[in-house]
Amino acid sequence: MKGFFPLAILRSAALLVPRELRAEWLAEWTGELWHVHEPAATAFCWGAYKDAFWLRRNCSAAEERHSRLEAPAHCLLLLAVLAASGWLGALLVPDVRTALAHTKITESLKGFLSVMGFAWGIVAITSRLSLGEYPVTANSPWRLIRLRRWLFLVAKVVLLLALIYIAAFGLMAFAPRMDRAVGLLLNLLVWTSALAFRWVLRDQQRRCPVCLRLLADPVRVGRSSGYFLEWNCTELVCFRGHGLLYVPECRTSWFHEQRWFYLKP
Amino acid sequence: MAIELRLSHTAAVILQAIDAGQGYGLHVMELTGLPSGTVYPAMRRLERDGLIRSQWEKQSAADAEQRPPRKYYKLTRAGKSTLDRSHKRYPLLAKMIPPAEVES
């Protein structure tokens, strides 16, 4: 029988597992723990949290949402539908229609783009802007296919800007009626845009550069304690077999950006 | 048309270890050198994708050795063919789990 601490770790991790799978999950881990030597038991049990998190994530609607956005066309379509419905909805409101008619587009665009620049600055400070290293090798696809990845990024940004622009316009049309609300709305606009840009970057970083589908099956390789002797990263794979992505857990001089490896077609 | 399932290198190593070893999580960890937090979620994914299937050992077998029963994993037919394809993709895979380990 193992000590109290490893079993306590397993029991607390079990709370994360969906109820219908919990008993079997706990039986498997305790069955394995019985064979683990005492000094390694605690380290063994910490892994139960990752397993439990995986089960929780993959037995919920999260996986469905993920698969809906997996294909690049679906992702663009969703953004296009959101932008189009935003514009249609806004044009149905008389105040917004009037505001649009009385606004000089070039001036409002200037103001909008400067706010977006500010939001982009926040993203640059708080997250990695680099999309990673994609070395050109014998297995790399044609330049045109590589270019498609950038076009996809531009399309996402344009659709998102269209959506944010009309949302901002709608909010600002109501602002004069609300006392001292402009500052609050501006803040809301900047932070929402920063979050949206962050999502665009993150989404782009997690896509295959060839087929543009979201990468799957993240597997953690290595341990934080062995950083100087072994890899410590997350490995993702393209289901179509175009390559593997390695995302470092923390940046080092030899591995500071996520790195893509093309596989033989 | 069903899409042919491709494995990451780590997932292929784990599949190889399940095929070569005794088919339980701890032995896969020993063969691959990967921590439990990597091996168990990877095995769940492989099972979800139909490449392996799990089975509890008989309670009587565990009782005879006065220990809790264990869950064993085996490759399915789809898993075998995926592993064969992975050998072509990752040629060093078979060398990473040496035959001596297979027999132990």
Image (spheres, coloured by chain):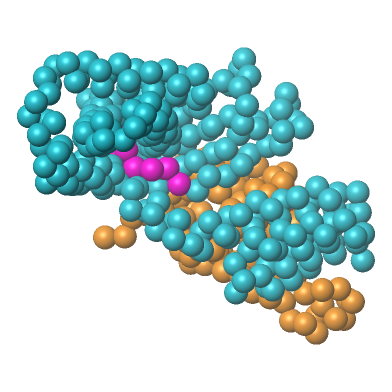
Left or right, A62 with respect to A109, comes to: right
Name the spot of residue A169 as percent of width and height, x first: 22, 32
Compared to A231, does A63 lie above or below? below
Residue B20 location, quadrant: bottom right
Q: Residue at x 34, y 32 (%)?
A: A179
Q: Principal SS element in the magenta part?
A: loop
Extreme residue in the bottom direction: B60
Name the spot of residue A239 as percent of width and height, x first: 40, 47
Q: Residue at x 77, y 32 (%)?
A: A225
The magenta stretch is A209-216
Compared to B30, does A136 lie above or below? above
Q: Quadrant of the C terminus of chain B?
A: bottom right
Pick whichever, A42 or A123, lies toward us.
A123
Pick whichever, A246 or A170, lies toward us.
A170
Q: Colour of chain A?
A: cyan
Q: Is A20 colored magenta in this rendering?
A: no
Q: Quadrant of the N terminus of chain B?
A: bottom left
Name the spot of residue A176 as percent of width and height, x first: 25, 31
Left or right, A79 with respect to A70, comes to: left
Pick whichever, A82 or A251, lies toward us.
A82
The chain assigned the colour orange in the figure is B
Determine if residue A226 is in view. yes
Name the spot of residue A256 as percent of width and height, x first: 57, 20
Residue A232 location, quadrant: top right
